Image (tube, rainbow, N blue to C red):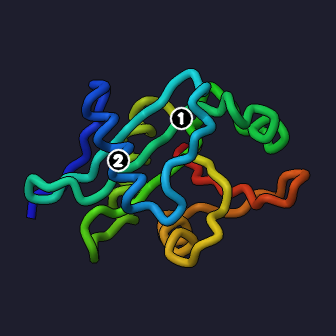
Amino acid sequence: MRKYIIEYINREDIDFLKELIKRYHPMGLPSESGWALKHRWFAYIIDGYICGVAWLHDSTPFEGVARLFNIDPHKSYFLRRICETCPGIDIVEFLEMIASKLKEEDIEYIWTFKPKYEKGISVFKGSGFVEIGKTKTKREVIIKKLK
């Protein structure tokens, strides 16, 4: 079984990945965060099929939260969405492949808000994310250290 990740930068490809997130992520595609300065779109390819999709962006939309927890916004990405598009795949492996690529780029952290759905919680636990605190609105912040 051949497994790898692809980062997409072409507008048509990104629009397709957005459609997959709308269909397969339990929370769909949010309308906010479009004003982040840098977006990254990844697909998890298994035997030629897109079996997972991830959307990360810089910390601009949540810069106050990043600073509250001493997360360098220039050395981190916020994981906005990750989901499987084929049943039964190892989404943890996909997240680890993304982490490995970002680590090679000298990124120190991937962080996000703890999801409210059970499968999301198990994915982040399996990938080594740890809770580092709560925002003023009681959202749990979880982080994966890459360095």
Q: Considering depth in this image, is 71 or 113 the residue closer to the camera?
A: 113
Q: Considering depth in this image, is 99 or 14 the residue closer to the camera?
A: 14
Asked whether, in this view, residue 111 is left or right of residue 8, the answer is right
Q: Position of residue 103 (x, y in %)?
A: 45, 39
Q: Position of residue 49 (x, y in %)?
A: 14, 55
Q: Secondary structure at mark 2?
A: helix
Q: Amino acid at mark 1?
A: His
Q: Residue furthest right?
A: 136
Q: Which mark is residue 84?
A: none
Q: What residue do we see at 29% from left, 62% from top?
A: 85
CB contact under 8 Å: marks 2 and 1: no
Asked whether, in this view, residue 62 is left or right of residue 115, the answer is right
Which of the 4 image quadrants contains residue 132?
bottom right
Q: Which mark is residue 19?
A: 2
The answer for how far apart the CA atoms under marks 2 and 1 are is 17 Å
Which quadrant of the figure contains the N terminus?
bottom left
Q: Which mark is residue 57?
A: 1
Which of the 4 image quadrants contains residue 86?
bottom left
- Position above or below: 74 against 90: above
Q: What residue do we see at 59% from left, 36% from top?
A: 76
Q: Amino acid at mark 2?
A: Glu
Q: What residue do we see at 63% from left, 51% from top?
A: 112
Frontmost of labels 2 and 1 is 2
Q: Position of residue 94 (x, y in %)?
A: 34, 57
Q: Residue furthest top?
A: 37
Q: Position of residue 82 (x, y in %)?
A: 44, 55
Which quadrant of the figure contains the C terminus?
top right
Q: Considering depth in this image, is 26 or 141 the residue closer to the camera?
A: 26
Q: What residue do we see at 40% from left, 48% from top?
A: 54
Asked whether, in this view, residue 104 is left or right of residue 112, the answer is left
